[in-house]
Image (spheres, rainbow, N blue to C red):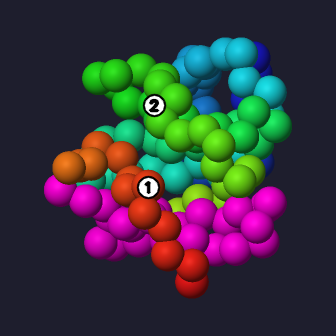
Amino acid sequence: MTEASTSPALDELIDPGAPLTPLGDGFLFTEGPARSGAEHHLIFSDIPADSWWRWSAAGGVEEIARPTFEGNGMAYEPDGSLLVCESVTSCLVRLRRTASARSSPSTTAGST
């Protein structure tokens, strides 16, 4: 894999000479990544597989939800809630963290 940058601002954030390392494989089409700085993980969706995945240095890649209503376009809010756009329902949902689910969003969604 090769990488090319035409943005000096991007080069300040990401070393253009750093090697690219795949985090996993077998996905159909990944999209919508969101990084949780507080919990040190990256969450992303595999839309055709209708699943969400989490990657962390400690745990590697693990599936965390299925089905997801083709949830995509994710972003974390400052309080740790996860906002997700669902393609199937055409809804924006907020998944709130719970004390029993500290490392992943709650499965209780509220439409916003």
- The quarter of the rendered structure image containing the C terminus is bottom right
Element on which disc 2 rests: strand
Give the answer, above or below, for where 2 lies relative to 88: above
Is 2 or 111 nearer to us in this picture?
111
Where is residue 99 shown, x and y percent of the image?
Answer: 18, 56
Is residue 69 shown left or right of residue 105? right
User: Which residue was labeled with disc 2?
Assistant: 55
Quick one: 12 or 104, which is closer to the camera? 104
Mark 1 element type: loop
Residue 33 appears in the rendering: yes
Residue 96: where, in percent of width, then height?
36, 66
Q: Which residue is mark 1?
A: 107
Residue 66 falls left or right of residue 35: right
Q: Out of 92 and 41, give the one closest to the viewer.
A: 92
Task: Look at label 1 and name its amino acid.
Answer: Thr
Three-letter residue code for mark 2: Trp
From this view, report whether residue 108 is shown above or below residue 110.
above
Residue 48, compared with residue 80, is above or below; it is above
Instruction: Name the quarter where the N terminus is drawn.
Output: top right
Highlighted magenta segment, given as a residue range: 77-99
- Tell me if 98 is positioned left or right of 52 in this view: left
Q: Residues within 10 Å of mark 1 (few under 14, many from 20)?
A: few
Residue positioned 25% across, 59% down in the render: 98
